[in-house]
Amino acid sequence: MTDRKSRNKKPARRKPRVNKDELFAHFRTMLLIRRFEEKAGQLYGMGEIGGFCHLYIGQEAVVTGLEAIAEDGDKRITAYRDHGHMLACGMHPNGVMAELTGRSGGYSRGKGGSMHMFSKERNFYGGHGIVGAQVPIGTGLAFADKYRENSHVTFTYFGDGAANQGQIYESFNMASLWKLPVIFVIENNQYAMGTSTQRASSTPEFYTRGTAFEIPGEMADGMDVLEVKQAGARAAAHCRAGKGPFILELLTYRYRGHSMSDPAKYRTREEVQKVRGEHDPIDMVRARLLGLSGVTEDDVKKVDAEVRTIVNEAAEFARSSPEPEAHELYTDICR
Amino acid sequence: MKSELLMPALSPTMEHGTLAKWLVSIGDHVSAGDILAEIETDKTTMEVDAHEDGTIVELLVAEGATDIPVNSAIAILEVEGTAVTTSETPRPVSPVAKAETAPIPPTAVTITEPEFTGETEKTTLRIALRDAMAEEMRRDESVFLMGEEVAEYQGAYKISQGLLEEFGARRVVDTPITEHGFTGLGVGAAFAGLRPIVEFMTFNFAMQAIDQIINSAAKTLYMSGGQMGCPIVFRGPNGAAARVAAQHSQDYAAWYAQVPGLKVVQPYSASDAKGLLKSAIRDPNPVIFLENEILYGHEFDVPRDKDFTVPIGKARIWQEGSDVTLVSFGIGMSHSLQAASLLADAGISAEVIDLRSLRPMDTETVITSVKKTNRCVTVEEGWPVCSIGSYLSSVIMQEAFDWLDAPVINCTGKDVPMPYAANLETLALITPQEIFEAARTVTYR
């Protein structure tokens, strides 16, 4: 990852200014996502969560940084590794966890599962299970904002795997042609399931993939929440100024498998350990916090305790919420 | 040597045209490739050019003349050089000029919407569809049209003629030829609360976008526990046109009718086209609106009332009868009504039902009819396996088994990709004669 970082076209222009409250807020959000995902993994192992379950552990700084610069009315949409996005945009952990367990208290009343959750209230448009399909949809959300002549932007997240899909380039073309306020956020965690970017992509610099469409792009360290935030702010300013789309490639890493059933044969344990040990997004913020005057180990531990309580409550809610009633089988098919 | 200039066919379905403008006069010398005239149909405007060098000696058709049949002479050219007699000049044969391949004309009897009693006017499906969109766009600011060639070109089939002028480029949006992308974009706009009308130049091209239609548009309301609706209309011509072969001649009715979360309609008459399209645009769900290119130019009585709509999910009995029930939809209705007329001549009284909606499907009207006639023939242009007809047969078997006096027959397109050759295409398509024979079989007459 360090060699990729050295190719960063626009490194952070100055050392991010550190505000203690903001830093604590980011720490808390990232920690909430991590503890939530650890709990989800645990519940999966216990058979409480079924089907597919794609954990976000390792990538927390991406959504945390971007949500920190999102404004009211901005929209977000992503693929199936979506739990972190929902927690970061303010959806309730109880509703997310209860959806994972397929219960009536879940955001989709148990009918969507891990990959298919939505919140109109939080402008979270899913949660999509088909690789790449969310990208034209996200472009359409931005089309609606342009149609309504407001200044909202849409964060359209996808991975390095989806970045090679045809519909992404159809979306790039229309977004640039019609100057749509969409930030294409490429979460490059370096593996599309088990296929590394080197084995799947003819060119590894995804942020340059908009060049043919005259869409500016930027790469940033997706493990550093403050760098993500700065890059995101530049991208959002570009969109809000009516200049059309922007591509943000955030270099990140997932610690867990693609899904819960992942043989992990495509990378070494040492590779994972190296990132965890040297470039973990949460550890980096913790170190920054502890470097500030007046912040103690206890202050940091307090956040962890608080987050664990929230996650335990979510798990409790998700296990006690009743299954959807049988008549729900036939509801919500058509309005 | 004199050479005839013939009225060209500008499309596979064109039968007549208008000579909008002569660009040459008698005595003019023309070279091959020179533009001689502008020809118009209700669908398109095109230029006619000279195929050889020569002098215009006669203009046989006046400027502005309408209803000029394809392949009739419009001018005489005195050709220079080696003599080639006129009779030896190969004369292009328009597919529509041949009786055996001619598209079935609409039945002479047009029946006004039975439940409608107000004033009507003769309108083609093309105009009815345009009017429906325009009226709904005036009524609701969130309705917009997008698709290939819908704006500046005025619609590949002229369905959107005049809409750009009235509503502007913000609401009538020309897209790149990228169905997968713009369909997904439309779905996103609908999630955000707009009401897109997505025009597919034909439904054959929607196969590139079918993931977005089914996985994104149809399923999201369910997957979101009722939160995220998708009020969108996907519309365009469906089924066989004429002589455009396998990749451009497929009926998708049965495909889409299978999908929970979609509504699927396929009108036959202009009044249903207009009333159903208005209902589709107002509907909070994704609606697949299947049109037919051959029917676009057909005229029917359409109510003048701007508030006239046709409910989705309700069949229409076109003709009451007592001996056999014919059930169809779309262009199949044209064949069925002709078959009903042949049957009447043979002393067999057919009840003809237009399903209009394929999902939800008004099977109740069909069952009621079958309980009366005790016999049923289903008619559709699509393939036989897992067809609309095979579904109807199973419903009839389950709900009206004791009333049946004969097995239900499904008249369908043949189980082959559409061939190009005129004779083979005719064999592949459903015909009134086949329906007539099927009705005789089930009535044992």
Image: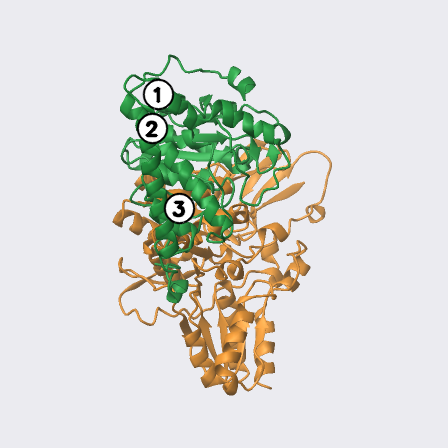
Chain colours: A green, B orange
> Residue A62: x, y in percent?
42, 30
Residue named by callout 1: A290
Mark 3 neighbour class, 10 Å CA radius: few under 14, some 14 to 19, many 20 or more: many
CA distance separating discs 2 and 1: 8 Å
A322 with respect to B53 (left or right)? left
Residue ID for mark 2:
A300
Q: Are marks 2 and 1 in contact (CB under 8 Å)?
A: yes
Give coordinates of residue A229: x percent, y percent: 36, 24
Residue appearing at x 44%, y 30% in the figure: A185
Cβ–Cβ under 8 Å for marks 3 and 1? no
Quadrant holding the C terminus of chain B? bottom right
| Residue type, mark 3 in image | Ser
Give x and y (percent) for residue B163.
Answer: 35, 43
Q: Which residue occupies 51% across, 55% down?
A: B238
Mark 1 lies on a secondary structure that is helix
Q: Amino acid at mark 2?
A: Val
Q: Nearer the viewer, residue A63 or B264?
A: A63
Residue B361 visible in the snapshot:
yes
Alpha-carbon distance for marks 3 and 2?
Answer: 63 Å
The residue under label 3 is B160
Tell me where residue A218 sits by quadrant: top left
**Of residues B158 and B401, which is closer to you in this image?**
B401
Along the horizontal axis of the image, is A133 left or right of A334?
right
Can residue B200 be seen at all in this image of the molecule? Answer: no
Using the image, name the chain to which the residue with label 1 belongs: A
Q: Secondary structure at mark 2?
A: helix
Q: Which mark is residue A225?
A: none
For mark 2, does the 10 Å Cα neighbourhood hold few (<14), some (14 to 19), or many (20 or more) residues? some
Please tell me whether mark 3 sits on a helix, a strand or a loop.
Answer: loop
Which of the two discs, 3 and 1, sits closer to the camera?
1
Query: Looking at the image, is B259 positioned above or below residue A304?
Result: below
